[in-house]
Amino acid sequence: MSVFQIIILSVFGVFAVGGLLIFAGVGGFSDSSGDIGTVLIWGTLSGQSFNSVLATLAEDNDGLRNVAYVQKDSRTYNSELTEALASGGGPDLFLLEDSYIVRHKDKVVPIPYENLPQQQFQSTFVSSADVYLDQSGVLGVPISVDPLVLYYNEDMLTKNGFVSPPVYWDELFDMAEKVTERDDANNIKKSAVAFGEFVNVVHAKDVLTALIMQAGGTVAARDESGRLRGTLGSQLGEVAQPTQSALRFYTEFANPSKIVYSWNRSLPGSRDAFTSGDLALYVGYASELPLLRSLNPNISIKPAPLPQIRGADRSVTLGSLQAFAIPRTTQNIQGALSVAFILSGKSASAQLAEARGTPSPRRDLLAEAKDGPDAVFRSMAIISRSWLDPNPEKTAEIFRGMIESVTSGSAKLSEAVQQADKELNNLLGL
């Protein structure tokens, strides 16, 4: 055990019991004495919503009166955070998105498993939160999960004889054939689904990742030595190749020679097409619902579970998570940990989830009955999964190359997957 680990264990030791109580849903720290100290939090969540929740919680917990939250621009957040921590400054607690765990891991103080057991963590939070579990301890305490769901234009589906959105992906073939409208020159006028391309499909990388996961594959995973490796080219059993299967399905809808042809790269962005009433189905995140409805209040936009593979052993969707992480530069580790535990407790987590409009990552809250969109979002949060992305921007380019090499005809499916897997492992330094 390193000197650093010994120091961290001694600092965290006094919080072991309190942490377990919070994770069990019993409550939070009672800190009317104010010994939490001053804690500065950085994140990209709405400052108005977050600070409103903080103010409410502080009414019953004086220690939170010295906690301040600063909202950062999502476009510059990670670079600003990196620069601040490199100079020894920055926050005492920051929101760590799952796709940046690999990039920021060396900047985080891990919570030892002696103080926060892995089993307790996994019984409290959804499975997608497991990406915060590292060999060194817990890298972040989850506060938000944003699952990938299916949005549909109810009027557009009804007009074409469909009373509900697809439950299984194979239903999409019939829907694409009947809903998509093309002129005599085969130009697409209205589309069932925006699949097949990258540049004008919002969340194309995430959609394909979800399809790969549903097929039983992974994008990257740790090997026996704990090293992260690309797994796009891996087989499942003797013959199944999840990435090839997912890529074949995804690109099918961009092939002009297919009867299900419904999308190409000359069309507007998928979100714009959807909110303009020219696209029946749109795969997006739970957090997008207010935006989608505000862009066009005149169309009936509803959320539904992300379709699954018929006959599959399990249901899966992709989830985007955020968690409270403690930077190594903080001078108030105890206070930061205390605040992280309080804000991940059942009451605070429920308030933050309601303020943001996305599900809590806590299993006990997800089990509570809800109606309407909340019910859809909670059901998807429960089955959500995530993965350790070494570099979101560069892996997006790898996915783009894999997709476009197939749609352009420059590579076969197997070649495209093999090349993407090679590039991913090069990115990982393998």
Image (spheres, helix red, strand yellow):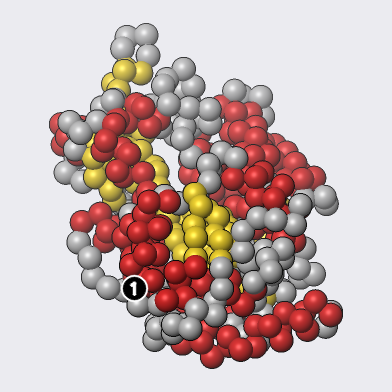
Residue 16 figure quarter: bottom right
Instruction: Tell me residue 294's x, y (percent).
Output: 26, 35
Neighbour tally class for label 1: few under 14, some 14-19, many 20 plus, Cα within 10 Å = few
Tag count: 1
Can the viewer see residue 177 in this picture? no
The foreground one among 349 and 410 is 349
Residue appearing at x 29%, y 50% in the figure: 304
Please identify the quadrant where the N terminus is shown: bottom right
Residue appearing at x 61%, y 33% in the figure: 400
Residue 55 figure quarter: bottom left
Can the viewer see residue 347 in this picture? yes
Residue that numbered label 1 is attached to: 59
Placement of 263 over or under 250, stated as above or below: above
Instruction: Tell me residue 200's x, y (percent).
Output: 48, 27
Placement of 121 over or under 192, stated as above or below: below
Left or right position of 367 against 126 = left
The foreground one among 139 and 372 is 139
Residue appearing at x 84%, y 80% in the figure: 3
Instruction: Tell me residue 80's x, y (percent).
Output: 65, 45
Placement of 296 over or under 345, stated as above or below: above
Instruction: Tell me residue 324's x, y (percent).
Output: 55, 65
Placement of 237 over or under 429, stated as above or below: below
Secondary structure under badge 1?
A: loop
> Mark 1: which amino acid?
Glu
The foreground one among 219 and 361 is 361
Q: Hey, which residue is sitting farthest top in the picture? A: 185
Residue appearing at x 27%, y 73% in the figure: 368
